[in-house]
Amino acid sequence: MGLPIAFLPFIPRAFPFDFSMIPVAYMLLYQYFRTWKSFILAQLIMALTYAYIGEPFCEWIKLVNYLEWRYRYSFIYYIIVGIVTRALILKLASLSKPQDLTTK
């Protein structure tokens, strides 16, 4: 039995996962883990879960089909994206703080 026919074949089948579950997970990590240490620990747990449980499951149910891709690549990708995103958000938040314009 082959893969099912997609209603919209130009949209990847993993699109809902990539654009809903992953960003929401990053948002929750950012919201609930305020320090870098706790964020990195939570990020490692999330990356391990998504890369070594979520992705094999998605492959098993034939949601995705990886060619020349290893789960460790995804693990590293999730870590890098999480750290870069948090650093960018913290930088943007520091730039948006009101400046003290009064002179002494």
Image (spheres, grey):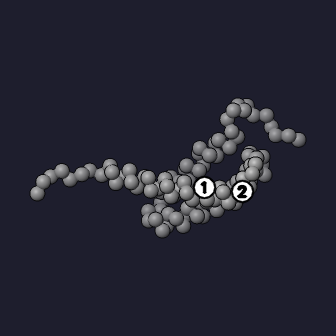
The spot of residue 75 in percent (x, y) is 63, 59
Q: Position of residue 15 (x, y in %)?
A: 65, 41
Q: Is residue 28 visible in this depiction of the protein?
A: no
- Disc 1 marks which residue? 77
User: Mark 2 belongs to which amino acid?
Assistant: Arg
Circle 1: is it few (<14), some (14-19), or many (20+) Cα within 10 Å? few
Residue drawn at the location 44% of the way across and 65% of the way down: 35
Residue at 60% over, 55% down: 77
**Residue 7: percent from left, percent from top:** 73, 31
The answer to whether residue 97 is seen in the rendering is yes
Q: What secondary structure is marked by label 1?
A: helix
Q: Residues within 10 Å of mark 2 (few under 14, many from 20)?
A: few
- Asked where in the image residue 9 lies, by quadrant, the reply is top right
Q: Is residue 46 left or right of residue 66?
A: left
Residue 76 picture quarter: bottom right
Q: Quadrant of the C terminus?
A: bottom left
Question: Residues at badges 1 and 2 in contact (C-beta under 8 Å)?
Answer: no
Q: Which residue is mark 2?
A: 70
Q: Alpha-carbon distance for marks 1 and 2?
A: 11 Å
Q: Is residue 32 above or below residue 98?
A: below
Numbered label attached to residue 53: none
At horizontal 60% and vertical 64% (from top left) the residue drawn is 45
State which tag comes first along the sequence, 1 or 2: 2
